[in-house]
Image (cartoon, helix red, strand yellow):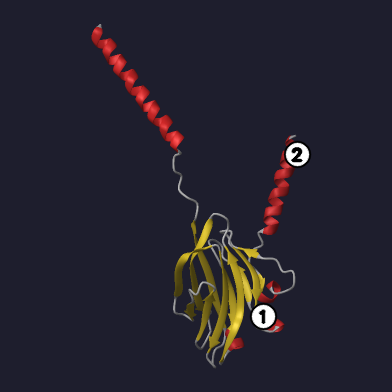
Amino acid sequence: MRKLILGTLTFLLISAVGWATPCTGSLNSFLSPGAKMCTDANGNAFSSFTSSLSTSDSAKLSLSPLSSGSGFTLSIPLSLFAGTTTKDAFGFTVTAPAGVSLTDFEATFTPSAGATGTASVLLGLSNKSNLTADLGAGKASTTFSGVSSLDLIADITASANASGTAILTLMPSTSSTMPSAVPEPATLSLFGIGLLAAGLLLKQKKRAESSR
């Protein structure tokens, strides 16, 4: 029996690890037919990746997981977008795990050493809470009413002299949707009866002591 239980737990653990694929690899690898979704450290799932880029160009963008928290990073070669605005450069759907809702989205566009020019990423969210991450300008964020999932489409713009690599960090934030625990009426009634009984016993004890 013990071996059966251990075997079952091992199977479940392996299955869970297998499904929890980290967001790592080229963008193109997530566009292939039958490509699996990926998840972050907080259990958010990223799926339905899209891109208007060619197969060879989408292979030049690469995803990497964050060591902790929500989201992932995307390495972007700036020369690929130099002098243009590329509509729908990439997109995906993010879905929060059960019991939580997406309530915030943050993006940071950071130039790597040696990067030149200017660039920005316009992130269009399906709930219309759009934001723009400018290269080297720090964090851009938007807060909204909680939703279970969001579709995101990104347009990338870069100046003609843009070169080098930039890292786009995408971080959804969540909050719990589980209601706080409220005592049931029956529980409150039993608690009240208990207090009443304790009070009566204490009163009888004091009477017995005073009559001695």
Closer to us: 97 or 20: 97
Give how far apart the Cα atoms at labels 2 and 1 are: 46 Å
Judging from the image, what secondary structure is the residue with disc 2 in? helix
Query: Compared to 156, does 44 lie above or below?
Result: above
Mark found first going from the N terminus, 2 or 1: 2
User: Residue at position x 36%, y 27% from top?
Assistant: 195
Quadrant position of the C terminus in the picture: top left
User: Residue at position x 68%, y 58% from top?
Assistant: 19
Where's residue 130, x and y in %? 49, 76
Closer to us: 166 or 69: 69
Where's residue 32, x and y in %? 73, 74
Quadrant position of the N terminus in the picture: top right
Quarter location, residue 199: top left
Where's residue 196, x and y in %? 35, 25
Query: Compared to 53, does 93 lie above or below?
Result: above
Number of numbered discs: 2
Dot label at residue 90: none
Quarter location, residue 78: bottom right
For mark 1, what is the residue? 58
Residue placed farthest to the top in the image? 212
For mark 2, what is the residue? 4
Closer to us: 53 or 199: 199
User: Residue at position x 52%, y 68% from top?
Assistant: 171
Tag 1: amino acid: Ser
Judging from the image, what secondary structure is the residue with disc 1 in? helix
Tag 2: amino acid: Leu
Where's residue 106, x and y in %? 48, 70
